[in-house]
Image (cartoon, rainbow, N blue to C red):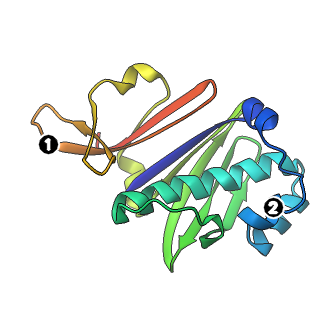
């Protein structure tokens, strides 16, 4: 199981008022809010944590086929963070998911997996030309159709100027 999320930081800054009263309390746990407030650039930490939650949500949605909005149920813990990458775990209902995020001045791209070994088998595209060949199940879950007509799990994300597609299997 895989999930990914990409955030256009310029667009996020224009569209969201993350500092408004109640915003952080609605989306983040107490521990996550402390990470945000202690971060060198709190706004970047907001979007990093949100991206992690969204990527793991896509894994859960693929497994359960249920759409829901419950950001505090996705709890981001262990976080190793520097200016260009972040890695850690995000828990949902007692299940651990690992993530790796790549940060630039303009975007955050997070890839989450259910099993750490999946990181070795990912194919990542960041251009929309990779979109060809994607189909969706009757439940709206995206897949790639391989040359042998088997389905390959794929996670798609787009925001503002950015697009990312991650598939399992090389």
Mark earlier in primary sequence (1, 2): 2
- Above or below, 150 against 19 in this view is above
Q: Which residue is mark 2?
A: 24
Q: Relative to residue 57, is residue 170 drawn left or right?
A: left
**Image location of residue 133, percent across then percent down:** 26, 28
Q: Relative to residue 128, is residue 45 drawn left or right?
A: right
**Image location of residue 54, percent across then percent down:** 57, 53
Q: Relative to residue 149, is residue 97 drawn left or right?
A: right
Q: Residue at x 45, y 59 (%)?
A: 67
Q: Residue furthest bottom?
A: 94
**Image location of residue 82, percent across then percent down:** 75, 48
Mark 1 and mark 2: span between their CA atoms? 42 Å
Residue 143 seen from this side: yes
Secondary structure at numbered mark 1: loop
Mark 2 crowdedness (10 Å alpha carbons): few <14, some 14-19, many ≥20: some
Q: Residue at x 89, y 53 (%)?
A: 20
Residue 150, disc: 1
Is 22 in front, or is 47? 22
Residue 105 seen from this side: no
Secondary structure at numbered mark 2: helix
Do labels 1 and 2 touch, CB within 8 Å? no
Location of residue 116 (image quadrant): bottom left
Which part of the image, by quadrant, shows the C terminus? top left
Q: Residue furthest left?
A: 148
Is 66 in front, or is 114? 66
Which part of the image, by quadrant, shows the N terminus? bottom left
- Above or below, 46 against 9 in this view is below
Q: Residue at x 52, y 62 (%)?
A: 98
């Amino acid at each position: 199981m895989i999930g990914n999320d990409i955030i256009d930081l310029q667009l996020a800054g224009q569209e969201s008022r993350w500092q408004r009263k109640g915003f952080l309390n609605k989306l983040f746990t107490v521990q996550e809010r402390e990470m945000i407030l202690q971060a060198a650039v709190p706004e970047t930490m907001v979007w990093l944590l949100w991206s992690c939650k969204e990527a793991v949500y896509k894994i859960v949605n693929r497994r359960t086929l249920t759409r829901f909005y419950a950001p505090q149920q996705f709890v981001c813990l262990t976080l190793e963070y520097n200016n260009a990458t972040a890695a850690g775990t995000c828990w949902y209902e007692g299940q651990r998911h690992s993530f790796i995020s790549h940060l630039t001045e303009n975007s955050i791209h997070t890839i989450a997996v259910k099993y750490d070994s999946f990181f070795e088998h990912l194919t990542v595209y960041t251009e929309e030309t990779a979109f060809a060949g994607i189909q969706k199940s009757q439940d709206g879950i995206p897949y790639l159709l391989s040359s042998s007509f088997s389905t390959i799990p794929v996670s798609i994300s787009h925001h503002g100027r950015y697009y990312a597609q991650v598939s399992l299997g090389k």
